Amino acid sequence: MEEFQLYLMMQERIQPEDYSLIDAHKKIIDDRVAEADANPDNYVTYQEFKDTFKKKINVSAANSHTRPSKC
């Protein structure tokens, strides 16, 4: 846990202007956003993903007779 806290502290120090994308990476992102916009039924929201993941974890834990640890 301490490593994660250190990571979070370091992330707070990084400013948005410290990041830059090359044009090729920007194009990849733009293409993926366009694909998602054109075919929204092919994708799930983050909330849908989390809900499905939690259900799978709970089913797995129930089958193994152990409880999942809380994050």
Image (spheres, rainbow, N blue to C red):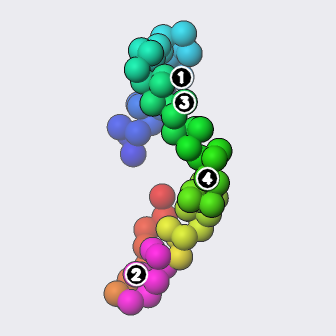
Question: Mark 3 and 1 residues: CB-CB less than 8 Å, in contact?
Answer: no
Residue type of the residue flagged with mark 4: Asn
Is residue 51 toward the left or the right of residue 28 in the image?
A: right
- Say whether disc 1 or disc 4 marks the residue closer to the N-terminus: 1
Residue located at (54% from left, 14% from top): 15
Position of residue 44 measured from the top left corner of the image (x, y, whole percent): 59, 59
In this view, the residue farthest toward the front is: 38
Q: What element carries label 4?
A: loop
In the image, which disc is placed on residue 39? 4
Report the residue at 42% width, 24% height from top. Answer: 25
Q: Name the residue under label 3.
A: 30
Nearer-the-camera pick, 20 or 51: 20
Identified by mark 2, the residue type is Ser
Compute the Cα span from label 1 to label 4.
35 Å
CA distance separating discs 2 and 1: 35 Å
**Sequence order check, earlier mark of 2 and 1:** 1
Q: Considering only order in the chain, which callout, 1 or 3, is on the residue closer to the N terminus? A: 1
Q: Is mark 1 on a helix, strand or loop?
A: helix
Residue stretch rendered in magenta on the structure: 56-63
Kind of residue sitting beneath label 3: Asp
Does the image show residue 57?
yes
- Horizontal and vertical percent position of residue 64: 34, 87
The circle on residue 12 is: 1
Q: Which residue lies furthest to the top in this view?
A: 17
- Residue placed under numbered mark 2 in the picture: 60
The 10 Å Cα crowd at callout 1, few under 14, some 14 to 19, many 20 or more, is few
CB atoms of marks 2 and 1 within 8 Å: no
Q: CA separation, marks 4 and 2?
A: 31 Å
Query: Residue 39 placed where, x, y %?
Result: 61, 53
